[in-house]
Amino acid sequence: MAGEYDLVIVGSGTAAMVAAMRVSEEGWRVAVADFRPFGGTCALRGCDPKKMLVGGAEALDHVRRMHGRGVVGETAIDWPGLMAFKRSFTDPVPENHLQRYAAKGIDTFHGQARFVDHTRIAIGAETLTFRHALLACGAEPIPLGIQGEQHLMTNEGFLGLESLPHRIVLVGGGYIAAEFSHIAARAGSQVIVLQHAERMLKAFDPDLVGWLMEKFTALGIEVHTGTKVGAVERTNEGFKVHASSAQGPMSFDADLVVHAAGRAPALASLDLEAAGVAVANGRIQLNEYLQSMSNPAIYAAGDAAQVGPPLTPVSSHDAKVVAANMLKGNQRRPDYRGVPSVAFTIPPIAMVGLSEAEARKQGLKFRVKSQKVPDWFTARQAAEPTYGFKVLVDEATDRILGAHLVGPHVDEVINLFALAIRHDLTAADLKRTIFAYPTGASDVGYML
Ligand SMILES: Cc1cc2nc3c(=O)[nH]c(=O)nc-3n(C[C@H](O)[C@H](O)[C@H](O)COP(=O)(O)OP(=O)(O)OC[C@H]3O[C@@H](n4cnc5c(N)ncnc54)[C@H](O)[C@@H]3O)c2cc1C
């Protein structure tokens, strides 16, 4: 099968699938390569399997919240059963992807891709010649540079655990640490989060994160902020995590230590230098069309490019941009306005647009409406007191600058604010909209 291709794609995730389908429709000869099972991070090791585990944890949480409100009986997570449910989704993914590629006449290669020169790439024993190459190789956990780093398990390992260890330490404090800690705590583990920064979930509004942190406390998740992990040591009983904070050195015993401390483009094994692709600070040097600035035959999309936020819908958007630019010449630039972001804690926290700090930094004139609203019907009906919002509206145009939500259904409701931002709807437009009642959306008018 080795030979000449119009496009060789490194990676088989969302960006790869979207780009491959678009260019193959135009008759291009396409090859897709991955050294892992086909399907990419979101479907196999990220969003989807995580959300399936969150589903179990949510069900349990809802039952517990309804205790004393007409629901009785203890509920528990059967971890192997929940994992089997997860696998019912993830197991068929690689074969489905291979079949979709085959149906379009797209060749697939298993192996690590490495550039040979400006127009050739080796995948295992095969060498392919390309007119264009697309780096859709995603991201991988950043090296922490600490002693005992090899003892840390990544997202891939955690989402495949056949049994859940009792004592879990999560290193990092972003959305992966937040989500995994909520799943594991509900499934019965003792969870400790060690976060280098001064607060959890730095990408989200500090006030709303503060309200959400009450949930971490209620769940018994021990969160240590301002805490730097220095080493992980294997012991007879498991692991000892050595860390330090302003209070001095400390250590934590664990059966499992999870890397949740950030991800960066997976470029190390590609030998980009051989292809003349310039990289600075771990990022491919790309122009506004997501094209390599030093080798115009090569483009990048999604987590590998990290021009937009590292999220699945962004990988898909980038792939459409890149496919159009490869097919018709550079003409499309990515547009990341109104990309919503959700951490699937229970309840979830969500944001879209500018943070209050960013809006102030930009010198914008805006009004802010922010409130913690445990007494609103949405919160009371779900027996979930963690419910609140912060919405920024531009004074001059009445357009939504940013929306920040925490509580029941906000993972869905945030999309309404995203729609408003992306399509320049005003606060008045949203207020005039008639939403179904009682739903999370029916609160939108009161948030403005
Ligand atoms: C735990 C977790 C939870 C997440 N949850 C969400 C969420 O809820 N919502 C959301 O929008 N996003 C979420 N994300 C992010 C989302 O998964 C990514 O943004 C998205 O999957 C990136 O897609 P991609 O196509 O750019 O790359 P990927 O899907 O990562 O695909 C890249 C592929 O390239 C392969 N590869 C890498 N190097 C080589 C090489 N040299 N040769 C051959 N193959 C190679 C890799 O094996 C990989 O399969 C989550 C991520 C993680 C880790």
Image (cartoon, rainbow, N blue to C red):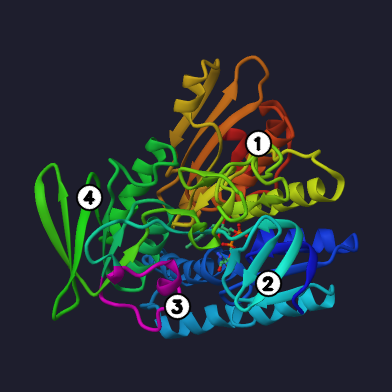
User: How crowded is the residue under tag 3: few (<14 C-alpha within 10 Å), some, or many (20+)?
Assistant: some
Asked if residue 76 shows in the view, the reply is yes
In the rendered view, does 232 fall on the left or right side of 112?
left
Judging by the rendered image, the residue that carries numbered circle 2 is 127
Tag on residue 17? none
Q: CA distance from mark 4 to mark 3?
A: 27 Å
- Which marked residue is nearer to the observer: mark 4 or mark 3? 4
Q: Residues within 10 Å of mark 1 (few under 14, many from 20)?
A: some
Determine contact: label 4, label 1, CB under 8 Å. no
Marks 2 and 4: CB-CB under 8 Å?
Answer: no
Task: Give the alpha-carbon distance from disc 1 to disc 2, as whole Å.
Answer: 39 Å
Residue at 56% in and 75% down: 36
Q: Is residue 448 visible?
A: no
Q: Provide residue 48's location: percent of width, then percent of height.
A: 57, 67
Q: Which mark is residue 160?
A: 3
The 10 Å Cα crowd at callout 4, few under 14, some 14 to 19, many 20 or more, is many
Q: Which residue is mark 4?
A: 228
Hey, which quadrant is residue 110 in on the image? bottom right
Q: Nearer the viewer, mark 2 or mark 4?
A: 2
* Residue 219 part of the magenta segment: no
Q: Earlier in the sequence, mark 2 or mark 3?
A: 2
Question: Viewer-nearest of labels 2 and 3?
Answer: 2
Label 2, residues with CA under 10 Å away: few <14, some 14-19, many ≥20: some
Query: Mark 1: which secondary structure?
Result: loop
Query: How far is mark 2 from mark 3, CA to CA?
Result: 33 Å
CB atoms of marks 1 and 3 within 8 Å? no
Q: Quadrant of the C terminus?
A: top right
Left of 39 or right of it: where is 220? left
Reading the image, the residue beneath label 1 is 337
Residue contact between numbered discs 4 and 3, judged by CB atoms under 8 Å: no
* Residue 200 x/y as whole percent: 34, 46
- N-term-proximal mark, 4 vs 3: 3
